[in-house]
Image (cartoon, rainbow, N blue to C red):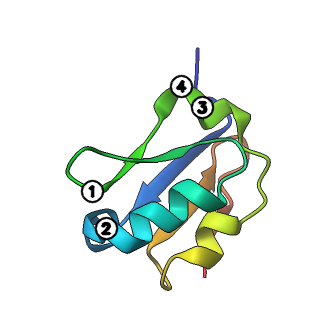
Amino acid sequence: MTAMFIRIDMMPETAADRELAKKLAEVCPVNIFAQAPDGSAAIVEENLDECVLCELCVQAAPPGGVRVVKLYDGTVLER
């Protein structure tokens, strides 16, 4: 079963931004983000369990754009 470790919350505006989608796909070391055919950001669900909590996605996005929710303790990585 995947995604037991974290959940990624992404604002619709963040997902729709093509340049940001490209950046998210580039910065994630475990390929949680991909650029969809329409250019928007997509979350690769099967890679969620690979997250290393590096916060690169959080820092790449505008404040509130991407949140990493730790499902095991309820804390949130965000800016």
The residue under label 4 is which amino acid type? Glu
Q: Is residue 74 above or below residue 13?
A: above
CA distance separating discs 2 and 1 = 5 Å
Chain-order first, disc 1 or disc 4: 1
* Mark earlier in primary sequence (4, 2): 2
Q: Amino acid at mark 3?
A: Asn
Asked if marks 4 and 2 touch (Cβ < 8 Å), the reply is no
Question: Quick check: 56 left or right of 3?
Answer: right
Q: Are marks 2 and 1 in contact (CB under 8 Å)?
A: yes
The tag earlier along the polypeptide, 3 or 2, is 2
Q: Which residue is mark 2?
A: 18
Q: CA distance from mark 4 to mark 2?
A: 22 Å
Q: Position of residue 52 (x, y in %)?
A: 79, 47
Residue situated in front as seen by the camera: 79 or 54: 54
The residue to which callout 1 is attached is 39
Name the N-terminal-most of marks 1 and 3.
1
Could you classify mark 3 by the number of other residues whose Cα lies within 10 Å: few (under 14), some (14-19), or many (20 or more)? some
Q: Residue at x 53, y 62 (%)?
A: 24
Look at the numbered disc 3 and give the secondary structure of its residue: helix
Q: Does the CB distance between marks 3 and 2 fall below 8 Å?
A: no
Residue 65: percent from left, percent from top = 44, 74
> In the image, residue 78 lies at what x, y percent?
61, 73
Q: Which mark is residue 46?
A: 4
Whole-number angstrom distance, CA of label 1 to CA of label 3: 20 Å
Q: Are marks 1 and 4 in contact (CB under 8 Å)?
A: no
The kind of residue tagged 2 is Arg
